[in-house]
Image (spheres, rainbow, N blue to C red):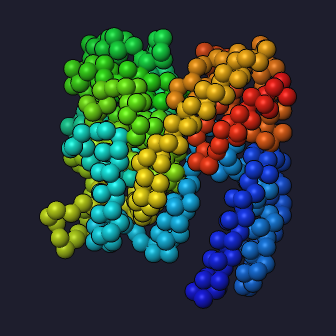
Amino acid sequence: MNHDDLNLWSKRAADWARDYHATLRDRSVRAPLVPGAVAGQLPPNPPETPEPMEAIFDDFARIVPPGITHWQHPRFFAYFPANAAPASMLAEQLANAIAAQGMIWQTSPAVTEIEQVMIQWLRQSLGLPDGFTGTIHDSATTATFSAVLTMREKALAFQGNLTGLSGQPRLRLYASAEAHSSVDKAARIAGIGQENLVKIPTETGLSMKPGALAGAIAADRAAGMLPAGVILCAGGTSVGAFDRIGECIAVAHAAGLPVHVDAAWAGSAMICPEFRQMWAGIEMADSIVFNPHKWLGAQFQCAVQLLRDPTPQIRTLGLRPSYLETARKEDIVNFNEWTVPLGRNFRALKLWFVLRAYGLEGLRARIRNHVEWARGACEALRALPGVTITTEPRLSLFTFALRDEAATEALLARINDDGRIYLTQTRHKGAYVIRVQVGQFDCTREDVMMIPQVVAELR
Ligand SMILES: *Cc1c(COP(=O)(O)O)cnc(C)c1O
């Protein structure tokens, strides 16, 4: 395959993509779960000689789609969305064609500079004050890990990276009981340890108790431990929990601790001013992560970390060996020094395309519709005998259950085998419940109202 063939096959791929998207509503959202069904169609050994692209493409079209859960299906209501707006797909195609590695400014100034401008566009879109800067990570998990490493190093006066953690005081982190597992992962792999991630219980409204946070920090200090930072939850994955951001940050800052806010899903909604009271006080955060790859239409990988002051993170993650030194040292940013990996692809291009192709008004309209339609679906479900709404909609996420756990679990299996919609489960207050989130880029009100219809039929 050469570049002329690539031109031909790119056009074939574009036609295939158009047909794929046009027929999504006719497909079962979730892939049939038959272990080995895909692997069994591939030969166990790699080819020794070149194969024609025709054969490769045919096999792709035959083998892959039946093994795909269609995340771009307009009736995908599982997990959180992983949207890929058409303008984002186009930008990714162009970024793939360029295939630049933007580890430092001079390895492609456009990659760094467009990223810097996009961070400022997003900062303004979320209503955050001047002064915040930031970078784009692959995932919220990596952004939270970076923030936790920075908390660790700040607490250790930047000696942990140099001397290791043995002999250091016992570091402590604080998060809500509703925090995402990426916070647990960060505590584990940052060398702090799961047992030193203190889960503060939540109260009504599912915020951690600010008083309990203050008490835990003080008790740990009295016991000779070293509190390092607080991770707050703005839109928990399970049922959409929000910590009371302003109050919790005030407690953390009074104790001299930095705060990272995980708004991976809900952050996108803050382009709508009417939702911003849900994270009131956010402008005091030291670090915030949100994923335009969830709800804003820019596909994987696009996790934006906003930082009030990037210096401690750069001090934690930045290294500048001689082979990475650059001709210019003033006024330039080398984004690898803000993140865990050295290499980085051109993630900002899709943001540039998406923000321009739909405009903030277009993106806000989608999010507002999703929130309103989720409420509509929730009310229709509430009206069904035997259905209980177990958590009310937070933005576009709510949960429901039938009278007993076995019946709820069996209903979810029937729904997902049916394939018209796709929902997933969580546990809330110990009970098995079905999660509904509305957020797919192309979904319509009719798609969303299919949820109560399917539940009514299959319950
Ligand atoms: C999805 C999610 C994450 C993890 O996101 P990745 O980008 O896949 O790492 C973290 N926190 C919350 C609240 C999430 O919803």
Task: Look at 40% across and 30% down and name the residue there.
Answer: 274
Q: Quadrant of the N terminus?
A: bottom right
Q: Position of residue 262 (x, y in %)?
A: 42, 35
Side of 120 where 89 appears, left or right: right
- Image-quadrant location for residue 431: top right
Q: Is residue 260 left or right of residue 194?
A: left
Q: Nearer the viewer, residue 189 or 91?
A: 91
**Residue 188 shows in the view:** no
Front-most of 90 and 65? 90
Horizontal side, residue 42 vs residue 314: left or right? right
- Compared with 348, 70 (above or below) is above
Q: Residue at x 35, y 15 (%)?
A: 210
The image position of residue 267, as x and y in percent, is 43, 38
Q: Residue at x 47, y 69 (%)?
A: 95
Q: How many marks?
A: 0
Q: Position of residue 115 (x, y in %)?
A: 34, 59
Using the rendered view, name the quadrant where residue 176 is placed.
top left
Q: Residue furthest left?
A: 330
- The C terminus: image quadrant: top right
In the rendering, at what x and y percent does residue 44 appear? 79, 67
- Image position of 149 with respect to 240: above or below: below
Q: Quadrant of residue 447?
A: top right
User: 253 above or below 37?
Assistant: above
One can see residue 121 in this view: yes
Q: Nearer the viewer, residue 108 or 342?
A: 108
Q: What residue is drawn where x is 35% and y is 44%?
A: 125
